[in-house]
Image: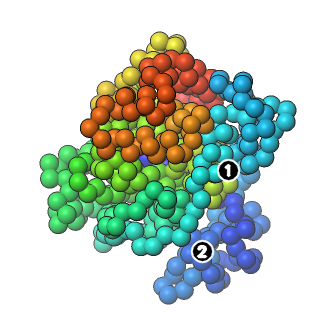
Amino acid sequence: MLIALVCTLTLATPALASSIPKSGSACTTIGATSVHKAKKYTCVKSGKKKIWNKGVSVRQITAPPPKLNPGNANKPSNQPSADGSNKSNQAPTIQEIALANMKKDMKPQTVGNLFRYHYSPNAKQSFKELLESDLNFAMSYWVDVYNNPELFNVFYGTEKDLNWLIEAWKPYGFDKNVGFANDFRGRIEREGNYLNAGAVPSQEGASHLSILRHSSLPSDPNSFIAHENVHIVQQFLTNNRTGKMPCWLREGSANLFGNFIFTDKAGINLYDQIKRSDMNNYQRGASGVELRRFKDSDWFAHLKSLEGNFQGGCDYINRFAYGSGLLLSELLMADSGFTKMMDFWRAFSQEKDWRISFQEIYGTLLDDWYRTKAVPYLMSEYSRVLPYPN
């Protein structure tokens, strides 16, 4: 099962609006945002009208100055940074190169109708609108690789709607072994008012995106929907074999691309804030393990534990795959780019050990890459990025 961490952040994109917004006044494009007098307004649908909502307060977020990370010392200093500019005084970081590579190769394009939506009677209208708007926006970055002729099923309900969801799956033959329903049942019990469970099951045959979200949560823009959309693309490119992916790749690359797509719209300076949340996701888990105390050998063993399909270190309760996987995916994107990442995803559709595919595509043995590239980057970033206070 593929599940995302929510990072609720504030947008600052005044260029998306053509006039000064006022709550209740008419706007032109659903999902457009505008900042005025320290408030961010979003264009929403109200009945048959398009109006600006009440707005939320905006605070300035200043990204910390970039630091040189392992593997960057020999990078030429004229490579583009995340915003496309060149830095003459120091080499760009791995993170900056990864973002620049995605910016270069992922150009949003017009998309048609790609989804079939199913809503519970309790579904919140504001989140329904956000879901449809953000899924279409996220998928606009994947037009060159996602050409599924079939509509993809999307289900959304609240904490009250698990039984509705189970019945809604039945016509499509989803979750016949009820394992997915039981997982959602556990999430409802554990997470209470913070429930925000979204998943694209790793299963043979057609999959689906299903969301159970507590009705008290605000419908604020964040990276959650873009993350889940990445899992939809993964299912398509792997021929519905994401269950063969190591969880560090499945969840880490979903974080990488989801965070990029969200911040490409909301402001690239938010990327560091979301990245910190992803890296510290394990602090919300149940393991009690402190990754920042790991030595080289501990990190290597940790990465080997993240090669499974939500077993060992991969289960959602421990939440290990999201932060470590994000950093590994950043590293692959920085060193080898978007096209090779897509080739790697496609390789999971083959009857071949994915470690062999990694060696063929990236030109190195997986364990050697762990030791010489991945572990140094993980240790550097977990030293640089602060944990959350206990």
Q: Which residue is mark 2?
A: 43
Question: The C terminus is located in which quarter?
Answer: top right
Front residue of this view, candidates 291 and 195: 291
Front residue of this view, candidates 90 and 265: 90
The percent coordinates of residue 283 (x first, y second) are 48, 31
Whether residue 61 is visible to the viewer of this picture, yes or no, is no
Under circle 1, the secondary element is helix
Disc 1 residue type (three-letter): Ile
Precedes in sequence: disc 2 or disc 1: 2
Q: Which residue is mark 1?
A: 268
Disc 2 residue type (three-letter): Cys
Front residue of this view, candidates 339 and 306: 339
The percent coordinates of residue 49 (x first, y second) are 54, 86
Under circle 2, the secondary element is strand
Question: How many callouts does the rendering have?
Answer: 2
Whether residue 298 is visible to the viewer of this picture, yes or no, is yes
The percent coordinates of residue 308 (x first, y second) are 32, 31
The percent coordinates of residue 339 (x first, y second) are 52, 46
| Mark in front: 2 vs 1 | 1
Question: The N terminus is located in which quarter?
Answer: top left
Pointer 2 with pointer 1, Cβ within 8 A: no
In the picture, measured across the screen, residue 356 lies left or right of residue 102, that is left
What residue is shown at x 85% (from left), y 36% (from top)? 88
In the picture, measured across the screen, residue 121 lies left or right of residue 138, that is left
